[in-house]
Amino acid sequence: MARRTTSLEVRRTERLTPHMIRVVAGGEQLSAFPETPYTDRYVKILFPRPGVRYPEPFDMDVIRAEFPREQWPAMRTYTVRALDHAAGELTIDFVHHGDVGLAGPWAAAARPGDVLRLAGPGGAYAPDAGADWHLMVGDESALPAIGAACERVPDGVPVVAVLEVADAAEQQQLRCPGALRTIWLHRRRDALDQLLDAVRGLEFPPGRVHAFVHGEAGFVRGVRRHLVDERGVPRELLSVSGYWRRGVDEDGWQAEKAAERAAAPGR
């Protein structure tokens, strides 16, 4: 069954850091956007193809049935940073690197009243309230989900967040009722494995860990192997996902993941 499409209007934007833009949207349709228990709550943002006029009311089922595939809206996956039904607001944070890509330039140009269409939400992770401590590892693409997860950790529970960003200007203040220790790493071309190296060098707190490892696919795979093979963390206590792969756009990355799933044993 296709996910429902929600059409919202931009209310305001805010540049959190030189390369992170927050977009806050609302509108009548937000009231039907479902609450979920997940902090990695993600949506597919729908971007119209240039020169293509879509039917109103906007309906992806109609578009898929009546339009050629090359005219379907482009989709980009983003985490819902916050959802406040009382205020009628949904917040998404976008990484912006100039004119590169699709979603970042859209966010940089967004103004109040602009339309934001999204499908979803999905999700599968929230911090386990029964865990003794939490490990969160990611880059800029995972910061919104990690920020949302930190806010859900119970009071006083230890959290170790290992985060890679471009430089000190990209660091954000994370709110967390738990006992948060943040390790910020600044990206270096000669140290592509520094996230993995930082996790390897950690002295783990005692007890059962619940780990969230998301971001660029290369480091995600390395950290997962380290946690499972060297630290003995049970797979069911890991939330692991490659959001993107270096040198590949989202369309290419999604195609790679689909091919990997199709080739997996038992399929």
Image (cartoon, rainbow, N blue to C red):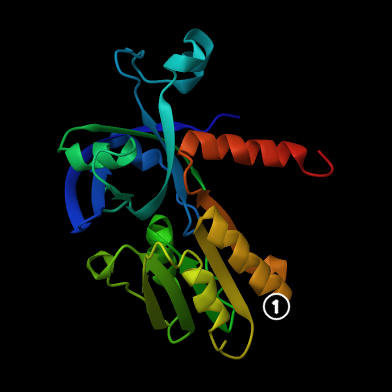
Question: Which residue is at a point 18% across and 43% down the rendered structure image?
Answer: 11
Q: Nearer the viewer, residue 190 or 135?
A: 190
Q: Nearer the viewer, residue 132 or 241?
A: 241
The residue that mark 1 highlights is: 230
In the current view of this chain or complex, which residue is farthest to the right? 266
Residue 150 image point, x, y percent = 41, 71
Residue 172 image point, x, y percent = 28, 68
Q: Establish if 191 lies above or below 38.
A: below
Q: Nearer the viewer, residue 134 or 83?
A: 134
Residue 175 image point, x, y percent = 32, 73
Quick check: 103 left or right of 65? left
Given the image, on which type of amino acid does mark 1 rest? Answer: Glu
Question: Which residue is at a point 41% across and 69% down the rendered structure image?
Answer: 163
In the current view of this chain or complex, which residue is farthest to the front? 190
Question: Which residue is at a point 40% across and 61% down the rendered structure image?
Answer: 189
Q: Establish if 27 lies above or below 237.
A: above
Q: Establish if 225 lies above or below 206.
A: above
Quick check: 141 left or right of 255? left
Identify the secondary structure beneath mark 1.
helix
Q: Quadrant of the C terminus?
A: top right
Dividing the picture into quarters, in which one does residue 115 lie?
top left
